[in-house]
Image (tube, rainbow, N blue to C red):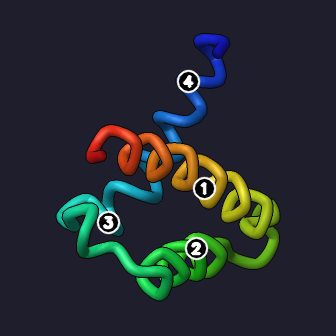
Amino acid sequence: MKPQTIDKYEYQLDRYVAPFLGDKRLDELTPALCQRLINSVVASGTRGDSDMATTAVRVRSILNIVLDRAVIHTQ
């Protein structure tokens, strides 16, 4: 993975995921909670801003990668 990719992932995690899910344990995460995170990313945009739906898709993808690794490491 390129360093720039890692930087982008870290930014998305710090900007959107950590403030929303940072205090949750892995066993406390639910599909509904993760969906609320995605909804909050979309809602964070304002008229005239860039399309937050694209950002939400990226955040979902990154969260999926992180959670897949977390599950592997907890087994």
Residue holding disc 2: 38
Q: Residue at x 54, y 81 (%)?
A: 35
Mark 1 secondary-structure assignment? helix
Residue sitting at the far bottom: 32
In the drawing, what numbered circle is on residue 39?
Answer: none
What residue do we see at 45% from left, 52% from top? Answer: 67
Q: Amino acid at mark 1?
A: Val
Residue under label 1: 59
**What is the C-alpha distance between the residues marked 1 and 3?**
12 Å
Residue of label 4: 6
Image spot of residue 37 (x, y percent): 49, 74
Q: Amino acid at mark 2?
A: Ile
Residue at x 66% of width, y 12% of height: 2
Mark 2 vs 3, N-terminal side: 3
Alpha carbons under labels 4 and 2: distance apart:
20 Å
Alpha carbon distance from label 1 to label 4:
13 Å
Residue 22 to residue 7: above or below:
below
